[in-house]
Image (cartoon, rainbow, N blue to C red):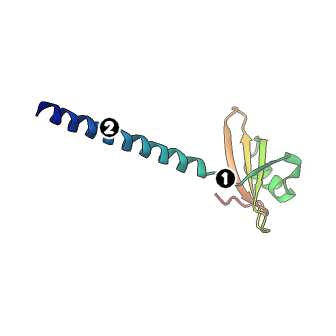
Amino acid sequence: MKKIVLMVAVVACVAFASQGVQASTVQVSVENVMQDDFVKIEVKELPQAVQDAITKSYEGSTVKEAYVAGADGAKKYKVVLVDKDQKEQTVVLNEKGEVIE
């Protein structure tokens, strides 16, 4: 009788352990799906309106990196700025130089 109870306990532990492993695998695969669609570009490729807006609104900051997204005509530009204190700030603008996010 003791052997039967012990075997049931072992089988239950194995069954619960395998379900825990499967749940963590699913979570990892969901995290890998999320990606943004921005592509890195040269700073000189930013439209003049975007460059003017950055100069006006973020005086004293320099552009460290620039990215573009949107192939359907409505483009968005993600710009990483560095201020005088070496703090980074990310800004997303449209083609007209308006902050959108």
Q: Residue at x 42, y 40 (%)?
A: 21
Foreground label between 1 and 2: 2
Upstream in the sequence, badge 1 or badge 2? 2
Q: Residue at x 75, y 41 (%)?
A: 61
**Viewed as shown, does residue 9 lie left or right of 48?**
left
The residue singled out by tag 2 in the image is: 14
Residue 92, x across and y down, in percent: 70, 54
Q: Nearer the viewer, residue 87 or 9?
A: 9
For disc 1, the neighbor class at 10 Å (few under 14, some 14 to 19, many from 20) is few
Type of the residue with mark 1: Asp
Q: Is residue 33 above or below residue 73?
A: above
Secondary structure under tag 1 reads loop
Q: Quadrant of the C terminus?
A: bottom right
Residue 9, x across and y down, in percent: 22, 36
**Viewed as shown, does residue 44 lie left or right of 31?**
right
Q: Residue at x 27, y 38 (%)?
A: 11
The residue singled out by tag 1 in the image is: 36
Residue 20, x across and y down, in percent: 38, 41
Residue 13, x across and y down, in percent: 28, 37
**Viewed as shown, does residue 89 lie left or right of 68?**
left
Q: Quadrant of the N terminus?
A: top left
Q: Nearer the viewer, residue 29 or 77?
A: 29
Secondary structure under tag 2 reads helix
Q: Is residue 43 above or below residue 14?
A: below
For disc 2, the neighbor class at 10 Å (few under 14, some 14 to 19, many from 20) is few
Quadrant of the image occupied by residue 64 = top right
